[in-house]
Amino acid sequence: MKIFCIGRNYSDHAKEMNAEVPVSPIFFMKPDTALHKESEFYIPKFTTDLHYECEIVVRIDRVGKNIGENFARKYYSEIGLGIDFTARDLQQQCKEKGLPWEIAKSWENSAPIGNHWFKTSELNMDNIQFHLEKNGATVQKGSSAEMIFSIDRIIAYLSQFSTLKVGDLIYTGTPAGVGPVNVGDELVGYLENKEMYRLKIK
């Protein structure tokens, strides 16, 4: 099982990170050990600046390679919600040295995900609404309508480079509002106003 993560897929997030808006999807990968499905999350000792990034997640349910964008919808039927946790201090060090970001993005438990999945038939795929609350206050709010690259475009692009297999996950990018978490915080993610996960930060 592979975990693909799309970077800078919302223009407002690219701007808040002082980064260029991409002309094609940017992606990186996390190992399957990055998945975290428990309600308690322990901040790893190697970072002092951990940031949340709430994202729509797509689960692939059919094997495909070189998928045409107009056929991409046939390769998934479920949508979930997750967090791409980022060790922002380590990421900044990597940026300054021109190094890859895996140390900041791809560590164990860095990809929390909810246990509930929506069928695509239950959603308006062109306008999937989601938001993240931190300690009861909304800190991120987004919609699939705001994505620079649609889910189908992402699938078509990724499948040029890697065969997509049943169970693969795609974290589709985060809107503006990313920020730090600390011990004692609680993160609650919602998709279409349904609670998808609740994380207590330890």
Image (cartoon, rainbow, N blue to C red):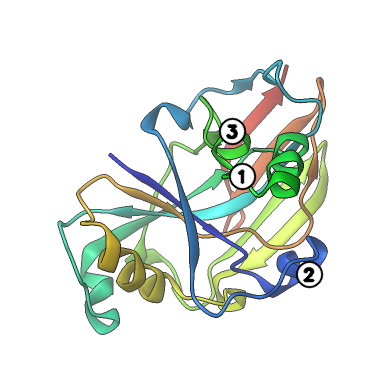
The residue under label 2 is 15
Q: Is residue 160 above or below residue 115?
A: below
**In which quarter of the view is residue 45 placed?**
top right
Residue under numbered circle 3? 103
The crowding category of the residue bearing disc 3, from other C-alpha atoms within 10 Å (few below 14, some 14 to 19, many at least 20), is some
Against 132, residue 119 (above or below) is below
Q: Is mark 2 on a helix, strand or loop?
A: helix
Q: Quadrant of residue 125?
A: bottom left
Q: Characterize the local packing of mark 1: few (<14), some (14-19) or many (20 or more) Cα atoms within 10 angstroms.
A: few
Viewer-proximal residue among 177 and 8 = 8
Kind of residue indicated by mark 3 = Ile
**Under tag 1, what secondary structure?**
loop
Q: Is residue 10 left or right of residue 25?
A: right
Q: In this view, does 73 lie to the left or right of 175?
A: left
In the image: residue 78, left or right of residue 143: left
Q: Give the SS element for disc 3.
A: helix
Which residue corresponds to mark 1? 99
Percent of width and height locating residue 88: 75, 40
Q: How far separated are the C-alphas under marks 2 and 1?
A: 22 Å
Check the picture and name the quadrant holding the C terminus.
Answer: top right
Callout count: 3
Where is residue 59 shown, x and y percent of the image?
A: 33, 52
Which quadrant of the rendered structure holds the N terminus? top left
First in residue order: circle 2 vs circle 3: 2
- Of discs 1 and 3, which sits in the foreground? 1
Closer mark to the observer between disc 2 and disc 1: 1
Q: Do the residues labelled 1 and 3 touch (CB within 8 Å)?
A: yes
Q: Which residue is drawn at 66% across and 18% down?
A: 42
